[in-house]
Image: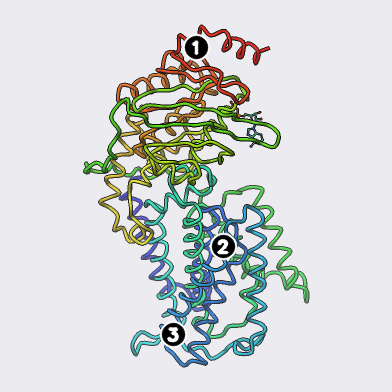
Amino acid sequence: MSVRQLRALEIAVIVLLAAAPLYVGAFRITLLNYVGVYALAALGLVLLTGIGGMVSMGQAAFVGIAAYATAWATTVGGYSPWIGLVLALVLTALAAAAIGITTLRLGGHFLALSTVAWGLSIYYLFGNLTELGRFTGISGIPPVSIGAFSLMSSTRMFYLIWGVAIAALFLAHNLLDSREGRAMRVLRGGNTLTESLGIGAFRVKLITFVIAALLAALSGWLYAHLGRFVAPGPFDVNVGIDYLMMAMVGGATELLGAVVGSGLVTFLKNSIQDFLPLIAKGAAGQLEIVAFSVLFIIFLQYARSGIVPFLERWLPRPQPKLPAQARPLERRSKPAPSTPLLRVEGAVRRFGGLVAVDKVSFDLAAGEILGLIGPNGAGKSTMFNLLTGALHLDAGRIRFLDRQISGLAPRHIARAGIARTFQHVRIRPRMTLLDNVLLGTYPRTRAGFIAGALRLDRGEEARARQEALTQLARVGLGDRPFELAGNLPLGNQRLLEIARALAADPVLLVLDEPAAGLRRQEKQALAELLRTLRTEHMTILLVEHDMEFVMGLVDRIVVMNFGSKLCEGTPSQVRGDVRVQDAYLGSAA
Ligand code: ADP
Ligand code: MG
């Protein structure tokens, strides 16, 4: 399917939706209104949970803060719903920022549990504040009006709700296809990966959390003026779980999953309500939850990733056009060949009683390729992690380009010009090759969240794409930039990681066991690439277990064993050294 056909399909769906009041009864329009309202809250969860990997069961609380804010402003305060909207957005953003700052550093399950905690407390807050009508709530909320035109009827609200929903989808779609959107999509790859790309993981998480809350706020504002009444019930944690379910059923990794999930859950709940009283008189309320849970469990068995990704497997993926030529991104000035670049002095790192790196010192000059080798457990990866900031030093220091980098956070070290790859490849399998490599350009570009959502970043984006395509071609993967990275064999994933590192325009490239797990042919392709980089005077530190692999590639070798530096020299010197032979034989024995 071409991009143009996809656009045509989108327009057809929007037209069909816009004409819905002509062929759908009033009751169904009301249902559709709620589908749109819930879809906005679920869309926030798609961004937060599906894309950003942060599970929240507290989304309903943000819907509630906004709904109560506008309810209070328009009834007690007597202000217009538009003032209510501003108040709703501001209050929700402030609450989300406060909650986010205190909880987002918690990992995995703890974060999810904390969302239950604040979700519940906000619910009880609504129920206990006299100003907010306690558990009776606030009624008599006025309809939204545009000038003298009042959106009193369900059909008029329909256009407002779906207008907002479609605009939100559109902006979110743009955002995900931009610099900060890619940063959001890399979060699930873990903090180590995110920070190694020069991205502030906490900052991106916090902003994603606030964006998700703002979508909930839009939902809450619409909800309050649609039903014209608010009470604490719809903002409880179990409704938060419903939103999470909508996102999951629809497909939490896809924006449209929010709409499909909200539609399915809303219509299904409605039909279960119609149907259950026929078989179970009286207990229908509880049975509804049971029936729904059963359906959900069946769903988890058969279409775990959700409906939209499930359907997408059968649809051809749109093939975007390659970008037009653009001016290349600025490159950083590189130190002249042979000037000192990196100096490691007396680096020490202990793990409990084990000294994994023991007073290791070495230098690296610009344009040089240095191999750091040693048997398994020698401390190479630990040394590597000290260098990239993933671990902190217990003693010693590391200077890079006239600057002390020991003690800096990994993202600052990345920004200083050290790009890394991982011993166990870390790419984003559901992103295209192009998007994976574009991640590398993050520190070289500037566009923010708003610029991305509004497509004000196209000039810079074209330049970044150009760079990414160049690097893809450089590693030999330039022929299919829109392939999903997860479809590549391991060897090519390694090359992709190197392309991503190169896209950062590094001064120093550090590779952790790039040949590990590769087949012979793949190793050859990798060696070929490293030789090309060498002719381009790229400075490389190669951490490697396989001695033969580095021999033909590097200028100099540092050998580590049991955490200490064993010796240092040219490949032939090292090869002839009996201590090295002993170390390797010792480890093989
Ligand atoms: P290499 O990469 O040379 O194979 P590593 O740097 O991974 O070696 O490991 C060096 C030593 O430090 C090993 O004995 C390893 O078990 C230990 N080690 C590495 N990381 C940790 C850690 N996070 N906690 C405890 N011990 C560790
Ligand atoms: Mg290692």
Q: Residue at x 49, y 12 (%)?
A: 574
Q: Which residue is mark 1?
A: 574
Secondary structure of residue under mark 3? helix
Give the spatial CA distance, label 3 vs label 1: 77 Å
- The response on whether ligand 1 sits within 8 Å of label 3 is no
Give the spatial CA distance, label 1 vs label 2: 66 Å
Q: Amino acid at mark 1?
A: Val
> Image height check: is 491 above or below 37?
above
Q: Position of residue 498 (x, y in %)?
A: 41, 32
Q: Residue at x 73, y 72 (%)?
A: 278
- Foreground mark, 1 or 2, reads 1
Q: Amino acid at mark 3?
A: Pro
Of the 4 image quadrants, the one containing the C terminus is top right
Q: Which residue is mark 2?
A: 264
Ligand 2 visible in quadrant: top right
Of callouts 3 and 1, the N-terminal one: 3
- Looking at the image, which is closer to me, 389 or 30? 389
- Looking at the image, which is closer to me, 148 or 132? 132
Q: Residue at x 45, y 28 (%)?
A: 492
Q: Residue at x 44, y 75 (%)?
A: 158
Q: Any mark on residue 81, and which?
A: 3
Q: Position of residue 298 (x, y in %)?
A: 68, 52
